[in-house]
Structure formats: C-alpha cells, structure tokens
Image: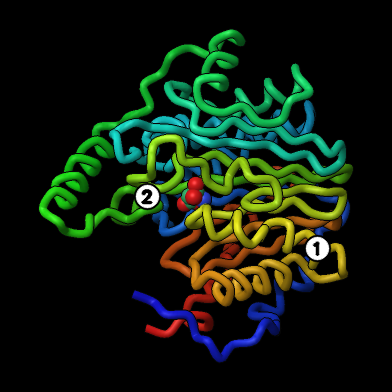
Amino acid sequence: MFHYKTSLKIAWKPCIEAKLTAQTKGMNIIALHGGLDTSRSRSFMEILERAALDGFVLLAEGRVPAVEAVLNVLEDSPNFNCGFGAVLNMDGEVELDASICDGETSRFAAVAAIRDVRRPISVARRLMEETSQVILAGDGALKFARKHGFPKDNCISEEQLDAWRKARESLARGEKPAQNLYTGLAYHGDTVGCVVWDGKGLTAASSTGGCSLKLPGRVGDTPSLGGGVYATKLSAVVCTGIGESFVETLTAKFVDEKIAGGAHPQQAVELALRRLAELKGAEGGILAVDAQGRIGSAFNAGQFPVVVMEEGRVRQGFEPVNLRRALFAH
Ligand code: ASP
C-alpha cells in the first residue's frame, strides 16, 4: 500500500530535460497509452504501435477517424481493458465507456455503461456525427448502436471470466480479491487513450471497461468531459486510473488550464498528478499533447505504456515519467 507524501507542495521541476526541448511544430503526432499497470512487454508495445500506424493511415481523413482507428485495434485485442477482454463488473457483465473530444470544433460525444458492443468508440463517433446529443448511457446507448448497425458482440474473454470467478470466490470468503482493479488481472492491459495533433487541431479519445468489480451501471471518468478526457484548441488530454478521483478533481481540464497558462505539457501532467495525489491520494497516468505537437506523459503507478508516433514513425526510446517514488512513500 502506498501513502501520499503529505509534505509535497504542488511545485514542478523538469524530470527529463530533453522532453522539454523536443518540439515538433508542424509535424503530426499520434500518442496513445495502454493504461495503468499494463505490461510494457514487446508484444503489448507492438499492438500499441500497430494501433498508432492504423491511426496515422487514417489521419488524412481527419483526426476523429484517426483516433477511432487507433482505439478500434485496442478494443479488438483481449490484452487491454476495453472492448473485447474488458474487466467484468460485480454481476459478471462487461459495461463499457468511451468518448471522443475534438478541440478544434468543440465537439464531444460519449457512450457510457454500454453492453454487447465491441467497439464503443465507434458508437461515440456515430453519435457525434449524426446527432447533436453528447452522451448516451446503458440501454439507450445500446439501442442507438443497434439502430446504426453495430452487431451484438460478446466482450467477455475467458481470462476475465476466470478472474471474475476467482474474485467473487475471494469476496464470498470475506477476503480482498487479489485482482488488480484496473486490469482485472496481474500486469494485464488496462483502459486505453489517444491524443492527436495534425497541425490543424487536437483530438482526444478514450475507451475502457472501467474498474474490475464495479457496480453495474457505474460510469467512470472516460466519458466525463474535463475529468478523464478533454480537448481544446490548445491541448488534448487523456487520463487513466480510478475514474472517480479524476471526475472529482476535473484533472483533464486542469492539465488544459495549465497548458493554456503557458506550461509545457510535461509540466502540466506532472502538476496534475501531484495535485491528484494531494487531493485524493490517487494513482494515475496522464497523456497530453499541445498545439505545438509537444507531448506530456507521466504516471505514479507500476507501468504506463505510451507510444508516440510522429509523421508515421514511432519515436524510439520514449518513456513517460514515473512519479511514483516522488509522490508516494511505502
Ligand atoms: N479510468 C477508468 C475508470 O475508472 C479505469 C482506468 O483507467 O483504469 O473507468
């Protein structure tokens, strides 16, 4: 168990100086993460890289098609906590949240607690493009999806079902389940998110199964504008971690405000994580890009795989800053 170091003030000094000088003005950027406490093994990173490439191919059609393509790859993969293979709620169902926010057009759309749809980010895109409404939840979201041709999909993987059974057995014995709340498993994949800068505008998108053993109907920060996702003309931000703490602190919006105030995205995400730890004692991972194509990414947990693609090329050796030691004492 980690405890927040209470003596820390919200102050910032750069952890990796090189990040601050790496400006990529004029280049297009696709940056994505595979969630908190996710594996950074080669096989996971390769899926993230493939997703980035799919997004890059569609960038010519627009930022929204690009983020959708990125997240579809991850929603189809059983390795991440989204789409197929997402964590199960207390009743043994998969309920998914997903959202897209386009900063240039101020458009936002989300689906929440939707069942039996493998690619909820595509439902959110359809909602954005075909209606003026912004959030659909539960049965209404499902009805909309079916009406727009999304087939009934099984999203429950054998691995997650097995993990859920074990967790329920632990609960029945009065024990705390051993499963990781984010991933449902030990070092498995988690919530995914993507930010895009195409030289003209910024877009953010996220897709998740939420937290393992959540109450049926629970909605996290992924469809919460300003909580776990945000985009303006100045920044695009996606977050991962226990959603309630992001919703209650409007963390994604805080990152945008810092960038609007002149902060480098790296400074903004680190300040946001410190604030999150101070206000909530919470773990998290944040990824942001600004309108100069500068990236910010930091986390304070075990793992946070991030891939950055510039002009279709993966930036080699990129690693988010881990603030765990700085923020928490054992
Ligand atoms: N933020 C997600 C939620 O609480 C879970 C996660 O990112 O791990 O719904």
Under 8 Å from ligand 1: the CB of mark 2? yes
| Mark found first going from the N terminus, 2 or 1 | 2
Which residue bears the numbered disc 2? Answer: 183
Secondary structure type for disc 1:
helix
Dot 2 lies on which element? loop
Residue shown at the point (66%, 31%) measured from the top left:
135
Residue 264 place in picture, x, y as percent: 79, 69
What's the mark number on residue 197?
none
Residue 251, image x, y percentages: 66, 60
Q: At x 70% / y 82%, what residue is drawn? A: 12
Work out whether 191 lies above or below 323.
above
Q: Quadrant of the C terminus?
A: bottom left
Q: Which of the pair 49/95 is nearer the observer?
A: 95
Q: Amino acid at mark 1?
A: Glu
The answer to whether mark 2 and mark 1 are in CB contact below 8 A is: no
Find residue 155 and report its image quarter.
top left
Q: Is residue 83 above or below residue 268?
A: above
Query: Which picture quadrant has residue 178?
Result: bottom left
- Residue beneath disc 1: 257
- Image: 133 above or below 223: above
* Residue 88: quarter of image: top left
Residue type at mark 2? Thr
